[in-house]
Image (cartoon, rainbow, N blue to C red):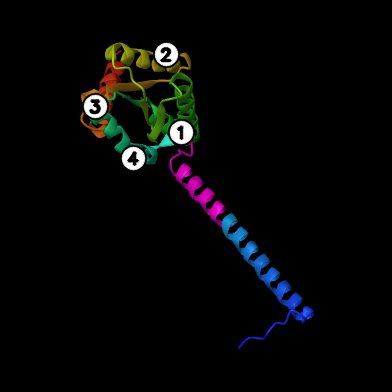
């Protein structure tokens, strides 16, 4: 049996109270530590996820981000909600890397990224796929005048690049032209190469 506490035994009672208060204080400190640790871990995980989706050179979204969006985009396609895909390639980047060095090539890549940020809507996703390739997901594409809207987007990007003396080729595809985001990207890529061939013939 435990030690019997008599109400007349004031010192013993006070000792027990102090022990309980000490235990409660320790539990409170442990809870605060666990709460702080959990918040720190959550913040770190969110930061890692965010960093995994960001291209370190340009600060744009990267290919990993695109992969995370494919299911959503496929659902939109299935539901008949339109969006556009711009596939963009930097002309002459390999030559610049070979003749002037990768530092100059990186400067060009960042200029292209900045131009895209300034010429497309803030609602759109700008993605650097890697190397000299970029992708723009044009969200909230209007259901009417598809060709007109497509030309508006293309002209806005091309005019922005030309005003900065940046040489690019691009292709555009609308989600209604394919049954998945991958087929739409492939179509935009194909049209980008068609644009590149036209530029070379000039």
| CA separation in Å, label 2 and label 1 | 21 Å
Q: Nearer the viewer, mark 4 or mark 2?
A: 4
The label on residue 187 is 3
50 is within the stretch colored magenta: yes
- Most common secondary structure along the magenta stretch: helix
Pointer 2 residue: 159
Span of residues in magenta: 37-57
Could you say which is closer to the camera, residue 4 or residue 109? 4
66 is within the stretch colored magenta: no
Q: Residues within 10 Å of mark 1 (few under 14, many from 20)?
A: many
Residues at circles 2 and 1 in contact by the CB criterion of under 8 Å: no
- Give the secondary structure at mark 4: helix
- Horizontal and vertical percent position of residue 82: 29, 23
| CA separation in Å, label 2 and label 3 | 23 Å
Q: Residue at x 37, y 16 (%)?
A: 153
Could you say which is closer to the camera, residue 188 or residue 46? 46
Pointer 1 residue: 60
Pointer 4 residue: 67
Could you say which is closer to the camera, residue 142 or residue 112? 142
The label on residue 8 is none
Q: Nearer the viewer, mark 2 or mark 3?
A: 3
Q: Eyeballing the image, is 72 above or below 149?
A: below
Report whether residue 178 is seen: yes
| CA separation in Å, label 4 and label 2 | 29 Å
């Amino acid at each position: 049996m435990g030690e019997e506490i008599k109400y007349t035994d004031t010192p013993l009672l006070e000792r027990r109270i102090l022990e309980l208060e000490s235990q409660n204080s320790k539990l409170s400190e442990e809870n605060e530590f666990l709460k702080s640790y959990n918040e720190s871990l959550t913040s770190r995980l969110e930061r890692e996820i965010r960093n995994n989706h960001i291209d370190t050179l340009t600060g744009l979204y990267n290919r990993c981000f695109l992969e995370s969006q494919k299911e959503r985009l496929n659902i939109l396609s299935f539901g008949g909600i339109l969006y556009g895909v711009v596939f963009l390639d930097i002309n002459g980047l390999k030559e610049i890397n070979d003749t002037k060095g990768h530092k100059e090539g990186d400067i060009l890549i960042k200029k292209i990224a900045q131009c895209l940020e300034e010429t497309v809507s803030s609602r759109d996703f700008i993605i650097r796929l890697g190397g000299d390739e970029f992708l723009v997901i044009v969200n909230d594409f209007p259901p009417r005048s598809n060709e007109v809207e497509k030309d508006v987007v293309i002209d806005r990007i091309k005019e922005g690049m030309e005003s900065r003396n940046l040489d690019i080729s691009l292709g555009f595809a609308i989600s209604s032209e394919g049954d998945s985001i991958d087929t739409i990207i492939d179509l935009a890529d194909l049209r980008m190469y068609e644009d590149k061939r036209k530029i070379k013939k000039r």
